């Protein structure tokens, strides 16, 4: 089964405070032009998206420079909705992260720097969250400096708690991009 983990992009899509709003305007209509097409105006970090190292790391790899293997692999969902404040180490299993894409079902909570350091040390391939942001600048820098991509604004993660699945979320190949919207999915076994 394929489970969609992406938010729809529309003019109602919430954006991080200060980021550009999503705008979708008709360009062509079938009745007038013989075909239908819209013009999209949005930031690289709109909706469900991935952060590349260049987003926080001077000289870091851009989204088009990261190997495609970073955007797919075995996934794991960790449900931390019952906690409060920053997600701490005591809420995270102590192993099982090597080569996996670790997704946090947070209900809006952010990761602590200690959790980010632990995930890097344990060899996580990528990290994601249902929250608008994975954490503060320090959390972003810890993960991105080690070329661990960050997926934000994921949805439907509650359907994957305790499940085995493959996570796939390829970005647009934006030259010099600090990130990109993605269509994130989970393929369950």
Image: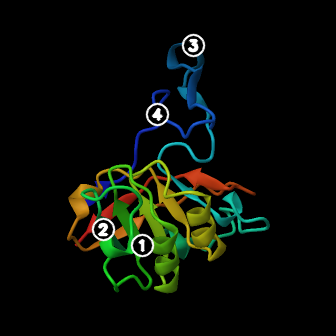
SS at badge 1: strand
Q: Residues within 10 Å of mark 2 (few under 14, many from 20)?
A: some
Q: Please, which colouring scheme is shown?
A: rainbow
Mark 4 and mark 2: Cα distance apart in space: 25 Å
Tell me if residue 28 comes above or below residue 96 in the rendering: above
Q: Residues within 10 Å of mark 3 (few under 14, many from 20)?
A: few
Q: State the residue in front, 86 or 97.
A: 86
Q: State the residue in front, 57 or 29.
A: 57
Q: Earlier in the sequence, mark 4 or mark 2?
A: 4
Mark 1 and mark 3: Cα distance apart in space: 46 Å
Q: Earlier in the sequence, mark 2 or mark 1?
A: 2
Q: Are marks 1 and 4 in contact (CB under 8 Å)?
A: no
Question: Residue under circle 3?
Answer: 32
Question: Residue under circle 4?
Answer: 13
Give me the disc on residue 114.
Answer: none
Question: Residue under circle 1?
Answer: 101
Question: Residue under circle 2?
Answer: 78
Mark 2 and mark 1: Cα distance apart in space: 11 Å
Image location (x, y in percent) of residue 165: 29, 71
Q: Quadrant of residue 26?
A: top right
Mark 1 and mark 4: Cα distance apart in space: 25 Å
Residue furthest out toward the right? 59
Residue at 44% across, 57% down: 110
Residue at 47% across, 37% down: 9
């Amino acid at each position: 089964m394929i489970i969609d983990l992406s938010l729809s992009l529309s003019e109602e899509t919430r954006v991080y405070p200060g980021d550009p709003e999503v705008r979708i305007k008709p360009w062509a209509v079938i009745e007038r032009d013989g075909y239908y097409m819209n013009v999209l105006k949005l930031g690289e970090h709109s909706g469900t998206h991935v952060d590349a190292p260049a987003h926080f790391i001077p000289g870091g790899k851009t989204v088009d420079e990261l190997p495609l293997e970073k955007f797919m692999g075995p996934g794991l969902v960790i449900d931390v909705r019952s906690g409060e404040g920053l997600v701490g180490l005591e809420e995270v299993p102590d192993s099982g992260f090597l080569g996996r894409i670790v997704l946090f079902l947070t209900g809006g909570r952010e990761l602590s720097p200690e959790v980010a350091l632990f995930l890097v040390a344990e060899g996580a391939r990528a990290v994601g969250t249902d929250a608008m942001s994975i954490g503060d600048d320090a959390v972003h820098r810890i993960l991105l400096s080690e070329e661990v991509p960050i997926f934000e604004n994921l949805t439907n993660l509650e359907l994957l708690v305790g499940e085995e699945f493959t996570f796939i979320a390829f970005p647009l190949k934006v030259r010099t991009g600090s990130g990109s919207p993605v269509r994130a999915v989970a393929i369950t076994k």
